[in-house]
Structures are given as structure tokens and as C-alpha cells.
Image: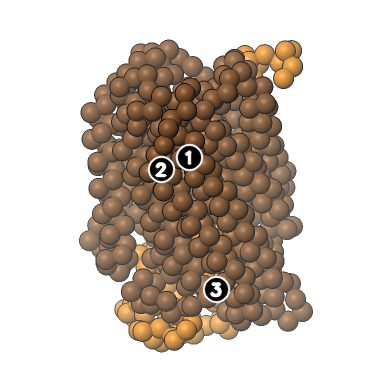
Amino acid sequence: MSEMFTKSMARNMFYGGSVFFFLLFLGLTFDTMSVLPERDHRENITPEVARGKMVWEVNNCVGCHSLMGEGAYFAPELANVYNRFGNSKDAIIGFIKSRPVDGIPGRRSMPQFNLSDDDLNAVAEFLKWTSEIDDAGWPPNIQG
Amino acid sequence: MQYQSQAVAKPYFIAALGLFAGQILFGLIMGLQYVMGDFLFPEIPFNVARMVHTNLLIVWLLFGFMGAAYYMVPEESEREIHSPKLALALFWIFLIAGALTIVGYLAVPYATLAKITGNDLLPTMGREFLEQPTITKIGIVIVVLGFLFNITMTVLKGRKTVVSSVMLIGFWGLAIFFLFSFYNPENLVLDKYFWWWVVHLWVEGVWELILGSILAFVLIKVTGVDREVIEKWLYIIIAMTLITGIIGTGHHYYWIGAPEYWQVLGSIFSALEPIPFFMMAVFAFNMVNQRRREHPNKAATLWALGTAVMAFLGAGVWGFLHTLAPVNFYTHGSQITAAHGHMAFYGAYVMIVLCIISYSMPLMRGRAAANPPKAQVVEMWAFWVMTISMVFITLFLTGAGILQIWLQRMGDTPMSFMAGQDQIALFYWLREIAGVGFLIGLITYFISFFVGGEEQAS
């Protein structure tokens, strides 16, 4: 490497560059936080939606499904499942409830989680709220 | 081995390799579940196998990084580790906590695990890669803080080098960004936004500092090139890593509710993220070509070159493939993501840990400089079998991903997710076969530790 470019120049580039871009990142994060309320519709996060997120988490749903494209790719995307199921919470609840305990021979099957009615309603509310987030038009189509 | 306390790295490396084997086993289980959906159902559902697979990866890499630090820092600082006893105590705490967590995943339903570990008090569970019970997360913080104390004290009291400083900055960053795993707001968008401060700022940020410092250390040792030259390269590489990678976080903010300007910023900066990896590959080959000694440990040199090339391919090239927002609109959350994840983690992090193990383990086992040539030949076979298998895993997942996107997201009559999955089963079978190839490579690697013979004079 060129002798013109010294180690102390490289060091300054590392410290200066890292600090500059981290501060820029903080600034952009600050701006993002100020515009998010219009996009995530947080005013609609009811106690049911919050409980639904908890149900989603303690059953590790993200271990098979993706949600807004993040998670596992073993089972369908769920950020738009509310729309895919005909804007119906009941259809979501019915699907989760009807999973066979021993699975389906030879095929992937969602486990039977034996959720209470309150939990089922909460997770459906959570998925409905999620479907209304402004996520720049993703996914490309209803299949997720 | 120049300092007695470096030997504390040995249990760390042994534990790392044991957990690595577990990770591969569960990877094969998941791969089979992709094509035989009822395999081990309902005893080990896919989500449990995946949790074990990814969590074992994270934990064994952390064992590997910490082992690397305990081995490297005494030589860099020219003094013994501040407290070898603390290092050993933390080893056992980490191993037992990790083992209990994995047993918890497998023994009881996840919801039960959440309940008995008091997730209600401070809910942090159930998010990808951060599935550990809150109490385990607290344990990780304690272990890492103890580790940081031990290493920082050693560095402060001894010779300060660029290699140890960069490593220390990497570990401090690792600890600080992990704290965001305790932030789990009710608002999913905020949750996701800051979840990436752990995940992205780890693997595309501070972990690369640890990677760079280990690579620099091994290259100094095996090539004999002047430290000044290597340290200058190290600074430039990690400067480019953070200059591109911090704003590059934006490539995760396209479709999770964040404003649209992230599509522009994320695309531009993450398109530049391959640069530091390309520089790393150029660096590794240059140093080996300019070597001033013929180090008898050929295997360690091979791992050093291998990690630089495979990190560039996996993280750099496969990352770039789907990082531009208009492309990512179609590829996001598909098998393309899985393809990239596999080769990037293997190339950048698995191989660098195997590299430092390859360099240091013979010394800790009392050899003068390297394993006997016969053992090195077996190890190099293992290198090629694992690496080529991983290339094929990545290619088959890429094929599956392209078809998935076409069938499910682009065609005139898009298929449902499950209908599409049935169509691409062939690629999943091929991936599983490549996975078996990887396991054979791993077994070969383990065998190489037990191959004897005459040691070559150094």
C-alpha cells in the first residue's frame, strides 16, 4: 500500500468515520421516531393488541412464520394474513384453533397451541393492527 | 504458547466445537422438516429446532470469540491474563446457562418456558435470535461484563497494540448493543427498529471488528509481515466496515414501517458494504504472498485465506444480490435471505473461529508450532468438504428462493406460500444432501484432532 497513506491516517479515518456515521445514524433515528406515529398508527394499539403481541412472542410464532418479512421462512407471511383471510379475525381464530394435535402425515402443520379465547382474540387483533402499518406497500401481493 | 494463562482459551474452543456439532445436527433436522413436514412432529416442531440451530450458532461463536481473546490478548499485551480464574469461572457459568437454555427449549413448550422463567416481569422472549429467557439474557450480560473487565484490565496494564484495541472496541460494542435486547415495546415497529441494533450492528458492525482483529493476529503470526503494515490494513478495513455498515442498517428498514428515505440510504450504503470484505480478501492474499517466513501451520493459513474469500462471497456478494430496495421488495423474507445468511455466517464467523482454533490449538496442546503434516492434511480436507458443501447449500437455497419469488410474488397468478413450497421441494432435498456433506466435513474436522505422526520442525 502507498507510503503516502500512513497508519495514523488510517486510524483517524476509522475513528472519525465511525463517530460521524454513528451520529448521522442517531440523527436519522431521531427523525424516524418523529414520523413513525403516522405510519404505525400507535393510537390503535389497544390492550388486546399489546396482549396479542405477547401471545405471538411466548409461542415463538416467528420461529416458523415471517412478519413483515422477518422471521423464519417455513410458514406463510402474516403481516397481511388479515387481508388474505378476507379481513376476518374469525378466520384467523378458526385456523389456529383447528390445527390437529398430531399434525398432518407427511406435511408441515402448525402445532396446536391450546390458546384461550382471550388469547386467540388478542393475537387476531394484533395481526389486524399489523396489517394496517404503512410498510411501503410490502408484500408485493396478497400471497405474502 | 508464550504465556501460561493463554491456556484458558482451550476449554472455550472445545465447548465451541461441541456446540457447533449440535448446531449442524439441528440444521439437518430442520432441512428434513422442509421436505418431510411431519418429521419429529409434534416432539420437536420446526420453530424449536430453528431456535436451537440459531442460538447454538450464536453461543458457540461467542465462545470462540472469547477463547480467541483469551489466547490473543496475553501475546499482544505481553503479560498474563488479569484473572485466569475469573475466565474459567465465567466459562462454566456460560456453558451451564447455555446448556440449561437449550434443554429448556427442548424439554418444555416455549410458552411454559416463558412462564417459569418469569417473562411477564420483563418480556424479552419470542423475537428472532433473541428467544433466550430473560434470565439467560441477564446471564449473558454478566458473563460478557466479567469477560470485558478481565480483558480490559489485561490490555490496560500491558503493551497496547492496534490488534488488541480493535478487538476490545468490538467486544465493548457487542456488549453495549446487546442491551437493546431488553427493549421490547408494545409497538411492533419500534420493536423491530431497535431489534436490528442488536442484530445488524452486531454482525455487520462490531463483530467485523472482532473478525478483523483475529484475522490480523493470525496473519502477523503465520506470514511474519511487519505489524505496521498489517495494522494499517486493519484500520482501513474496519473504517470501511463502519462507514458503510452503520447507515447500511437502513436495508432492514425498507418494509417494517420506517419512512421511505431508508430505501435510498439503505440501498446506497449497503451496496458499499462488500468493499471492506473485498479489501479483507485482497489483504489476506497480499500478506500471504509477501510472507517472510514459511510457517509450518499450513492449515491455519488456509483458514485465514478461506475466511476472507468466503466472507466476501457470502456477506459481500450474496448480500449485494438482494440489498437494493427495488430488488429487496421481491426477495425480502424469502429463501434468498436464508441463502445469504448461511454463507455469510459460515464465511465470516465460523471460519474465523476455526482459523484461530487451527492456529492456537496445536500450541495449547504442547506442539512446537503446528500439528503433524498428516493431521493438517485431514484438517484441510475438512476445510474443503465443509466449504464446498456450504457453497452448494447456498446455491440450492438461492435456486429455491428465485423460484419461490417467481411462483409466489411475480407470476400472473401468484401461488399461495404452501403451494409454492411444494413446487420447489427438489431444491430443498438437494440442500439437505449438501447439508449431509457438511456434516461429513465436520466429522473429518473432528478426526483431524486425533491424527498423530511426526511433528514438522518449525
Q: Which residue is mark 1?
A: B374
Q: Residue at x 27, y 66 (%)?
A: B107
CB contact under 8 Å: marks 1 and 2: yes
Q: Secondary structure at mark 1?
A: helix
Q: Are marks 2 and 3 on the same chain?
A: no
Label 1 packing within 10 angstroms: few (<14), some (14-19), many (20+): some
On residue B451, the disc is 2
| Kind of residue indicated by mark 3 | Pro
Quick one: B193 or A101, which is closer to the camera?
Answer: A101
Residue B270 in view here: no
- What's the CA distance linking mark 3 and mark 1? 49 Å
Write down the colour of chain A: orange
Q: Residue at x 54, y 22 (%)?
A: B220
Q: Which residue is mark 3?
A: A76
Q: Is residue B156 left or right of residue B264?
A: left
Chain to which the residue tagged by mark 1 belongs:
B
Q: Residue at x 39, y 59 (%)?
A: B52
Task: Say which quarter of the image contains residue A54.
Answer: bottom left
Letter of the chain shown brown in the rendering: B
